[in-house]
Image (cartoon, grey):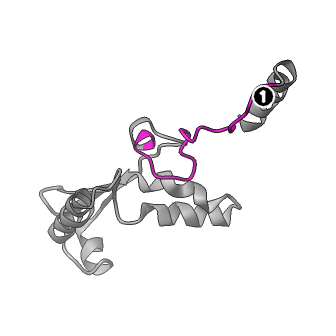
Amino acid sequence: VSKGVQNVLDYLQNEYPDMDVIGISGNFCSDKKPAAVNWIEGRGKSVVCEATITEDVVKKVLKTEVAALVELNMLKNLTGSAMAGALGGFNAHASNIVSALFIATGQDPAQNIESSHCITMMEAVNDGKDLHISV
């Protein structure tokens, strides 16, 4: 888009030599910056991932209880983020995963800012035995 705009501006500059070009971008794109417009309207791809983790795996692998994880998510990711005034970042560092993928695939890791606009939800399912998590 920037290259196209530059071509249009070059054409207009020839037609109107007195024209002053201040800048190509007005920064509303909020490229590489946290912005409410990206939280509200989205930017890039939106993805939802979810899984149900059995009580046995929560105990043996994560060394905790389903109810404890649900409470931790509520207190840390939801309440803590809200108290901090987070712009959609109600999660535990989701952008780290996206940054790792960007670096591994040769992408610009600074473009991961929108991946912090993520909500992690946890709830006990199957009579409170298993953990359902969605991001």
Q: Residues within 10 Å of mark 1 (few under 14, many from 20)?
A: some
> What is the span of residues highlighted in magenta in the rendered image?
18-38
- Residue 21, magenta (yes or no): yes
Residue visible at 76% across and 26% down? Answer: 19
Residue visible at 35% across and 51% down? Answer: 87
* Disc 1 residue type (three-letter): Leu
Label 1 element class: helix
Quadrant housing residue 133: bottom left
Quadrant housing residue 22: top right
Residue visible at 33% across and 78% down? Answer: 61
Q: Is residue 134 left or right of residue 26?
A: left
Q: Is residue 122 left or right of residue 11?
A: left
Secondary structure mostly seen in magenta is: loop
* Residue 72 visible in this rendered orientation of the protein: yes
Q: Position of residue 131 (x, y in %)?
A: 24, 61
* Quadrant position of the N terminus in the picture: top right
